[in-house]
Amino acid sequence: MKKDITTSILEDWLENVRPYAYDGQVANYIPALARQNPEELGVAIHYIDGNRVHAGEVDATFTLQSISKVISLALALMDNGEEYVFDRVGMEPTGDPFHSIYRLEQIPSKPLNPMINAGALAVTNMIHGDTPDEKVGRLLSFVHELTDDHSIGYDKEVAFSEFETAFLNRSLLYYMKQHQIVTGSVEETLDAYTKQCAIELNVCQLARIGALFANEGKDLDSGRRIIPKHLARICKTFMVTCGMYDASGSFAIKVGIPAKSGVSGSVMASLNGFGGIAVYGPSLDEKGNSVVGLKLLELLSNRYDLSIF
């Protein structure tokens, strides 16, 4: 696997995709995200040997949004085991939008996978903790381990904004509570979930998380195992089949790297034997994926033959 992508090369590629920044629009249905600047772009690569390259606005912070679903899934699996988690959430991809309630009406009435909103809400509900703040505190501690950075927190304004406007997610939770997929308070689960989505970091920190998954769950510096190997593999498999919403199939063909996107405009990719790639570009396409992120990952994958297929 080639590792000759330098900072200057990344800078050139980022400038090549910059014109795509206005081909989509920021996530204006979340008030706190509607103010993002489409021209604020960044990219970072963290190799599993510890070397790093980056370009663009690498100090710009953004919220994880749906990328947090990969992290919460890993923690829920570590808390409860595979059988418990997948009794309540399925393993199959979907062609429906990430916020769809339609599949919950089928028998059995459980979310198709952990990467759509219904599945992610159910997963957050499973994380151990007596209160939303305990769940979020454990998630943040987990992120601190993955990034080796204890300064990371969550954006309170974004969390509040999402909580106040999360009418569809409330509907999903009430539907799942009716069918015993989730337990406890709907509002408390939603509180934990919106704070989880509002965890805030930059592309360098996100690339390190991707690299740790690429390193089969082991810390990049110490070699200490943070995520069991088979659970890291499960998470990366979901990134391939479901990570880019209902564009996951076309992304697999065009790019072919396990990846997860978030509506803040961030994308985390994880490639065994290579490392983690993170891209930030707030402008989204109609599927909810970063326009610049998709284009940049496609160019890098084709130029350096990074596809796993």
Image (cartoon, rainbow, N blue to C red):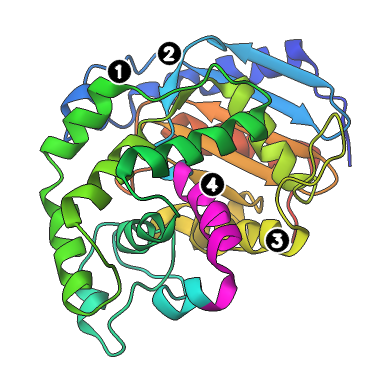
Furthest-bottom residue in this view: 107
Does the residue at mark 2 contact the one at mark 1 (Cβ under 8 Å)?
A: yes
Gap in angstroms between the C-alphas marked 2 and 3: 32 Å
Residue topped by disc 4: 71
Q: Secondary structure at mark 2?
A: loop
Question: Which sits earlier in the primary sequence, circle 4 or circle 3?
Answer: 4
Location of residue 108 (image quadrant): bottom left
The amino acid pointed to by label 2 is Glu
Magenta region includes residue 75: yes
* Residue 36 disc label: 1
Q: Is residue 91 toward the left or the right of residue 106 in the image?
A: right
Question: Which sits earlier in the primary sequence, circle 4 or circle 1?
Answer: 1
Question: Which sits earlier in the primary sequence, circle 4 or circle 2?
Answer: 2
- In this view of the protein, can residue 263 be seen by the observer? no
The amino acid pointed to by label 3 is Arg
* Residue 40 disc label: 2
* Residue 293 disc label: none
Does the residue at mark 4 contact the one at mark 2 (Cβ under 8 Å)?
A: no
Gap in angstroms between the C-alphas marked 2 and 1: 8 Å
Q: Secondary structure at mark 1?
A: loop
Along the viewing direction, whichever of 54 and 117 lies nearer the viewer: 117
Q: Which residues are magenta?
A: 68-83
Residue topped by disc 3: 233
Say if 281 sits above or below 174 in the image: above
